[in-house]
Amino acid sequence: MEKDLHLKSNPQISVDEVWNMSDQVVVDVRSPAEYNGGSFPGAINIPLLENEERESIGILYKHFGQIKAVEEGYDILNSKMDRFTGQFKQIPRDRLVIVYCARGGMRSQVVTSFLQHLGYNSRQLSGGYKAFRNWNLDKFDTFHFNFPFVLHGKTGVGKTLVLTKLENALDLEGLADHRGSIFGGIGKKPVTQKTFEANLLVDLEKLDNSKPIFIEGESRKIGDVSIPDPIFRQMKTARNILLEASIKTRVARTIEEYITRQPETIAHLKTIIGQLKSDLGKKQVANLIDLFDKEDYANCFEYILLNYYDRKYSHSMEKLEFSAIISTENVDEACREIQEHACSFQE
């Protein structure tokens, strides 16, 4: 490989241009750790340097300067050139390839030049991932819901069941891969804030803003991620719909969600129940653990729903006003009523 690829000028492309394209291939050439922290939606990771390699190059740069670091970088790349080239050869030659690194600097410059040499139509993302992150956040500042409706309801009423059947719905818990409660991370793989915000923008732009948009009521934080301020402020001023269901139905749905669908997480669930001592008391938690061990999930979850979740929920709901109260005993019927109610505000 030529050792002047980082000096060649490449055709540039902006974030806005890439966002509005289709059929392009976006390649993130940062290290796997950087990529896992957040990436351009749909980008594939073909790292120029692995995590340890990037770290060693950084140390070399700090102590011996850029020239030495660049030479070492080329030596590392040459040692794995066959594998690196093979990864790119999986991309069809007729596809436009967009390459980015952290700031649109040397790594993406080298790879874009290399792809040009291989005969690919490749372009370097101007400003790299940092430019995308700033652009992503700016987009939230200008996004406006025309007809937002926020669905509220106690744990187990089936808010997510309803959302998945409603047209034009935004599933924030799905994007966060977290249910937003003390049991919310069970069986989930929560995403980073950067990934959450990138995927949120993708889903926002899929919505039809000329029609009612349905969002599940959330606190600002969903697990470890936070809803961006511009979006959360609009949720706070949206019309609210309260969903209700009997405690029997709520318990059945909770058992279905946490036990029936995820039997492999039962041990984790038991551990979390054991952490409720400060809220429910040591004696009561011991009773709950006993019920859980006996597989009396109905009585165990009913107590937790009524005495833990409902108490916390009631406090957060005190100041809310609702434009409708709808039963979710029958999810399909609830969806029909919600749609009819929301559409009445457009007339």
Image: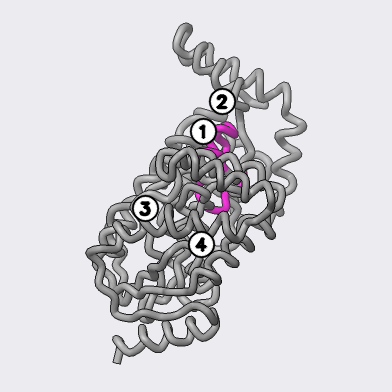
| Picture coordinates of residue 296, whole percent (x, y) | 65, 56
- Decide which of 345, 269 is in the foreground and name it: 269
Marked residue nearer the N-terminal end (4 or 1): 1
Q: Which residue is mark 1?
A: 8
- Identified by mark 1, the residue type is Lys
Q: Residues within 10 Å of mark 1 (few under 14, many from 20)?
A: few
Mark 4 and mark 3: Cα distance apart in space: 27 Å
Mark 4 and mark 1: Cα distance apart in space: 25 Å
Q: Are marks 2 and 3 in contact (CB under 8 Å)?
A: no
Q: Are marks 3 and 1 in contact (CB under 8 Å)?
A: no
Please name which of the two marks, 4 or 1, marks the residue nearer to the observer: 4
Q: Please indicate whether residue 265 sits to the left or right of residue 171 in the image.
A: right
What is the quadrant of the C terminus in the image? bottom left
| Picture coordinates of residue 123, whole percent (x, y) | 53, 47
Q: Are marks 1 and 2 in contact (CB under 8 Å)?
A: yes
Q: Please indicate whether residue 219 sits to the left or right of residue 78 in the image.
A: left
| Picture coordinates of residue 305, whole percent (x, y) | 47, 58
- Identified by mark 4, the residue type is Met
Q: Which residue is mark 3?
A: 227
- Residue at left offset 29%, top offset 79%: 323
Q: For residue 239, what is the image quadrant?
A: bottom left
Q: Are marks 4 and 3 in contact (CB under 8 Å)?
A: no
Mark 1 and mark 2: Cα distance apart in space: 7 Å
Q: Which residue is mark 2?
A: 4
- Residue at left offset 41%, top offset 72%: 214
Q: Farthest residue toward the bottom?
A: 347
Q: Residues within 10 Å of mark 2 (few under 14, many from 20)?
A: few
In the rendered structure, which segment of residues is drawn in magenta? 28-44
